[in-house]
């Protein structure tokens, strides 16, 4: 699995897992959105990442000072910025659904997410032609994202007429939030790149090469979880809804959120390992493939759970065409 082909396979599988993460959220009942989101975030982005890091990285607490506090602060800062996009992700998911939220946010993050890491590749190893090929593939990916966005806007119009309801006034705002979240979410990939010295130190201290990156992203996502947790806690406190965690299907809801967290952590560990396997251009090539696989999986689950009910014709063609364009761009990047 240490070959480039094995690394690409890991990226693809990690993305499919990541795109399935939020599907069980539709089965959470009786809890308000803020309660479910807070419980999920605490598991997926805070407790599980640190648990995995402590289990797989020897002397974890001594790794960070050895890497230098400048590197640690930069990694945590990118993680916090990514955490703001996570808040937007949750808001958008509640407004526009799984398939559109994932398609727009994940797809729009590809361009910056795969091009910005080039700034950290030494100039002697960064060919102009190669960079232009990556930019072209990302441009094609962005075109696919725009097709999905238009499809989503048309879907909302058709569904509002089909079930005789007023169009959700938040819908277009939700689309804008998706795009903003997509841009900000690139900070996650940058955290992995900037934090590579932490991974190198972890490896020197005895961590397996495939798990050394766990010291990096556990720091970034652990920091990034804080905005969601704080904001959700404030809203729950304002509405005095803490008792709601123990009501209704509390155990089932909690189990679903823990399961989602387990899927997310598994996909993230696999992605972090694949970046190391792919080498110099691991973050550049791996990121868009990871994102595209997540888009495919989330679109499938969104379709299966009825998000596109009553919709046919042009919106569906645009959606499937946008996905196909993104797959094409994914294949282009995979052959660079």
Image: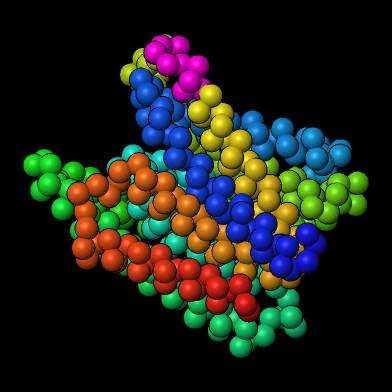
Residue 101 falls inside the magenta stretch: no
Q: Quadrant of the N terminus?
A: bottom right
Q: Quadrant of residue 115?
A: bottom right
Question: Majority secondary structure of the magenta segment?
Answer: helix
Residue 248 falls inside the magenta stretch: yes
Q: Nearer the viewer, residue 7 or 272?
A: 7
| Residue 238 drawn at (x, y percent) | 35, 20
Q: Quick check: 93 left or right of 191? A: left
Q: Quick check: 69 left or right of 325? A: right
Q: Quick check: 23 left or right of 163? A: right
Which residue: 57% across, 47% down?
A: 17
Which residues make up the magenta segment?
246-254
**Does 324 sit above or below residue 11?**
below
Q: Nearer the viewer, residue 216 or 298?
A: 298
| Residue 62 drawn at (x, y percent) | 85, 40
| Residue 296 drawn at (x, y percent) | 46, 57
Q: Quadrant of residue 221?
A: top right
**Does 129 sit above or below residue 274?**
below
Q: Nearer the viewer, residue 241 or 19?
A: 19
Q: Quick check: 75 left or right of 233? A: right
| Residue reaching furthest to the bottom | 129
């Amino acid at each position: 699995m240490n070959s480039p082909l094995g690394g690409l396979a890991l990226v693809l599988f990690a993305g499919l897992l990541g795109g399935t993460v939020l599907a069980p959220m539709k089965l959470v009942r009786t809890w308000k959105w803020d309660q479910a989101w807070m419980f999920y975030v605490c598991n997926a982005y805070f407790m599980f990442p640190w648990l995995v890091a402590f289990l797989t990285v020897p002397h974890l607490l001594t790794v960070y000072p050895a890497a230098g506090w400048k590197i640690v602060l930069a990694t945590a800062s990118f993680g916090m910025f990514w955490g703001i996009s996570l808040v937007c992700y949750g808001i958008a998911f509640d407004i526009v659904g799984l398939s559109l939220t994932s398609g727009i946010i994940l797809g729009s993050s590809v361009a910056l997410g795969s091009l910005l890491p080039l700034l950290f590749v030494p100039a002697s190893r960064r060919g102009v032609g190669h960079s232009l090929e990556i930019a072209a593939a990302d441009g094609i990916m962005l075109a696919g994202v725009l097709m999905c966005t238009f499809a989503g806007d048309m879907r909302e119009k058709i569904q509002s007429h089909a079930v005789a309801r007023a169009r959700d006034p938040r819908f277009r705002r939700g689309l804008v939030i998706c795009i903003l979240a997509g841009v900000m979410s690139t900070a996650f990939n940058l955290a992995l790149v900037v934090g590579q010295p932490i991974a190198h130190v972890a490896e020197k201290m005895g961590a397996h090469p495939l798990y050394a990156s766990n010291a990096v992203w556990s720091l970034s996502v652990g920091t990034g979880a804080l905005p969601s947790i704080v904001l959700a806690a404030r809203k729950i406190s304002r509405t005095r809804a803490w008792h709601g965690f123990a009501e209704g299907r509390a155990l089932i809801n909690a189990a679903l959120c823990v399961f989602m967290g387990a899927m997310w952590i598994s996909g993230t560990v696999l992605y972090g390992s694949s970046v190391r396997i792919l080498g110099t251009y691991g973050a550049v090539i791996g990121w868009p493939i990871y994102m595209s696989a997540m888009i495919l999986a989330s679109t499938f689950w969104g379709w299966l759970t009825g998000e596109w009910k009553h919709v046919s014709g042009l919106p569906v063609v645009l959606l499937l065409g946008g996905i196909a364009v993104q797959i094409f761009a994914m294949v282009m990047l995979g052959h660079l």
